[in-house]
Image: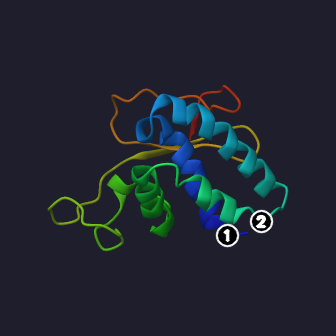
């Protein structure tokens, strides 16, 4: 099992509703949750995870950025040296962000708080607020 895909799917789930339209998110989120459950049970679902993230070109690009990053961070937090596409101009300053994840069992959702004004969401699987890592 490629753990990079597991981490990528967790991060995608945390930001899914900003990456695709509501209908696509409603269809895709349960599929991603089921793939995470199968991965936690020891099944190799790497290929299925990669295919699931191709529902839109924008989601596929975003997920590729997360997957390629050694720390599987939100693309806005990645060093320009690790980005797979051209990012905004700048000197590669570190952006502070807090990482949150589902507090129940194996994390189904990972979410990066990019601004203190963003409310912390709930895990779509367990309906519990995400906890700061």
Disc 1 element: loop
Q: How far across and down, in percent of the image, does residue 125 sit?
A: 69, 33
Q: Residue at x 78, y 48 (%)?
A: 37
Asked whether residue 101 is in view, the answer is: yes
Tell me the residue that label 1 is attached to.
Answer: 2
Q: Residue at x 19, y 58 (%)?
A: 88
Task: Determine whether 1 is above or below 35 in the image.
Answer: below
Asked whether residue 133 is in view, the answer is: no
**Looking at the image, which is closer to me, 104 or 69?**
69
Task: Determine whether 122 is above or below 3 in the image.
Answer: above
Whether tag 1 and tag 2 are in contact, CB under 8 A, the answer is yes
**Looking at the image, which is closer to me, 91 or 82?**
82
Task: Determine whether 128 is above or below 131 in the image.
Answer: above
Q: How far across and down, in percent of the image, does residue 39 sit?
A: 77, 57
Q: How far across and down, in percent of the image, does residue 120 sit?
A: 48, 30
Q: How far across and down, in percent of the image, does residue 96 sit?
A: 33, 50
Tell me the residue that label 2 is attached to.
Answer: 44
Residue 114 relative to residue 56: left or right? left
Task: Determine whether 50 is above or below 127 in the image.
Answer: below
**Looking at the image, which is closer to me, 108 or 92?**
108
Count residues near mark 2 (Cα–Cα under 10 Å), then give few for <14, some for 14-19, many for 20+: some
Q: Residue at x 37, y 56 (%)?
A: 75
Mark 1 and mark 2 lie on one chain; the one further toward the N terminus is: 1
Count residues near mark 1 (Cα–Cα under 10 Å), then give few for <14, some for 14-19, many for 20+: few
């Amino acid at each position: 099992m490629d753990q990079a895909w597991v981490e990528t799917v967790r991060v995608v789930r945390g930001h899914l509703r900003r990456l695709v339209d509501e209908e696509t998110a409603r269809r895709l989120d349960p599929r991603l949750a089921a793939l995470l459950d199968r991965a936690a049970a020891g099944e190799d679902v790497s290929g299925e995870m990669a295919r699931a993230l191709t529902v839109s070109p924008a989601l596929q690009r975003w997920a590729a950025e997360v997957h390629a990053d050694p720390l599987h961070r939100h693309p806005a937090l990645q060093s320009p040296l690790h980005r797979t596409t051209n990012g905004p101009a700048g000197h590669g300053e570190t952006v502070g962000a807090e990482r949150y994840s589902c507090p129940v069992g194996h994390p189904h959702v990972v979410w990066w708080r990019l601004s203190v004004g963003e409310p912390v969401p709930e895990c779509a699987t367990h309906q519990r607020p995400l906890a700061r890592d």
